[in-house]
Image: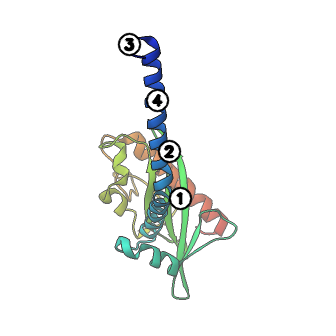
């Protein structure tokens, strides 16, 4: 292998480079796996708390979650939210398709079924600056303490009975998310026998 211009030298070099790179990536994956899983769980708990209308610093998220939320046994990823012994509401997962991909998140509904406690987005694949704005605070915050009067529960302004704002320039994403949230709320209300 003295001739660095030979085909064999190039093939052996590429195989060694590939093997070393693969080994380094595998070691990094193994060494960070636990930390990545912890961060994903923290993000999930933060989304659930936000959907319940609770804002706490990141270092308090897990303690507040453990103290106030109980997973509903017969409904995957659905949580009951308590303050002391009093049931305040339910946190229900939602998912569906938007313009460019999918969205998942949680929506909080009061125990009486008459108020939306909040909504948060866990993941989405929309274009940043357009449909991706569904993750921005101004958009998510308008769903807090929103009266749930009738179905459809969420209507974009300026329509008659409008109670939330769509995202300018992202009409299809806004409309798709509204439909997903309304479907989730309808399913929950039907299950609980509410509105």
**Which of 175 and 73 lies nearest the eye of the viewer?**
73
**Which of 64 and 167 lies nearest the eye of the viewer?**
64
Residue beneath disc 2: 26
- Near mark 1 (Cα within 10 A), the count class, few <14, some 14-19 or many ≥20, is few
- Near mark 4 (Cα within 10 A), the count class, few <14, some 14-19 or many ≥20, is few
Q: Is 66 rendered above or below residue 36?
A: below
Q: Residue at x 64, y 71 (%)?
A: 72
- Near mark 3 (Cα within 10 A), the count class, few <14, some 14-19 or many ≥20, is few
* Quadrant position of the C terminus in the picture: bottom right
Q: Earlier in the sequence, mark 4 or mark 3?
A: 3
Circle 1 SS class: loop
* Residue 55 appears in view: no
- Give the label on residue 3, or none: 3
**Distance in Å between CA atoms under marks 3 and 1:** 76 Å
For discs 4 and 2, the disc positioned in front in the rendered view: 4
**Distance in Å between CA atoms under marks 2 and 1:** 50 Å
Residue 125: x and y, percent? 43, 43
- Give the label on residue 16, or none: 4
Residue beneath disc 1: 151
Circle 3 SS class: loop
Q: Earlier in the sequence, mark 4 or mark 1?
A: 4
Q: Earlier in the sequence, mark 2 or mark 1?
A: 2
Quadrant in the rendering for residue 49: bottom left
**Distance in Å between CA atoms under marks 4 and 1:** 62 Å
Q: Are marks 4 and 1 in contact (CB under 8 Å)?
A: no
**Distance in Å between CA atoms under marks 4 and 2:** 15 Å
- Near mark 2 (Cα within 10 A), the count class, few <14, some 14-19 or many ≥20, is few
Q: Residue at x 32, y 55 (%)?
A: 136
Q: Earlier in the sequence, mark 2 or mark 3?
A: 3
């Amino acid at each position: 292998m003295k001739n660095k211009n030979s085909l064999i030298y190039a093939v052996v070099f590429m195989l060694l480079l590939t093997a070393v790179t693969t080994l380094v990536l595998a070691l990094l994956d193994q060494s960070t796996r636990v930390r990545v899983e912890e961060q994903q769980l923290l993000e999930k708990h933060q989304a659930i708390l936000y959907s319940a209308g609770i804002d706490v610093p990141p270092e308090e998220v897990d303690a507040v979650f453990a103290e106030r939320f109980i997973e509903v046994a017969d409904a995957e990823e659905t949580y009951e939210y308590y303050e002391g012994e009093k049931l305040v509401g339910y946190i229900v997962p939602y998912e569906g398709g938007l313009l460019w991909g999918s969205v998942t998140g949680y929506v909080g509904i009061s125990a009486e079924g008459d108020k939306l406690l909040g909504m948060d987005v866990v993941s989405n694949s929309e274009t940043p600056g357009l449909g991706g704005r569904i993750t921005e605070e101004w958009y998510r915050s308008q769903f807090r303490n929103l009266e749930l009067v009738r179905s459809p529960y969420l209507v974009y302004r300026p329509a008659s009975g409008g109670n939330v704002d769509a995202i300018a320039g992202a009409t299809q994403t806004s409309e798709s998310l509204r439909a997903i949230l309304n479907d989730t709320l309808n399913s929950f209300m039907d299950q609980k026998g509410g509105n």
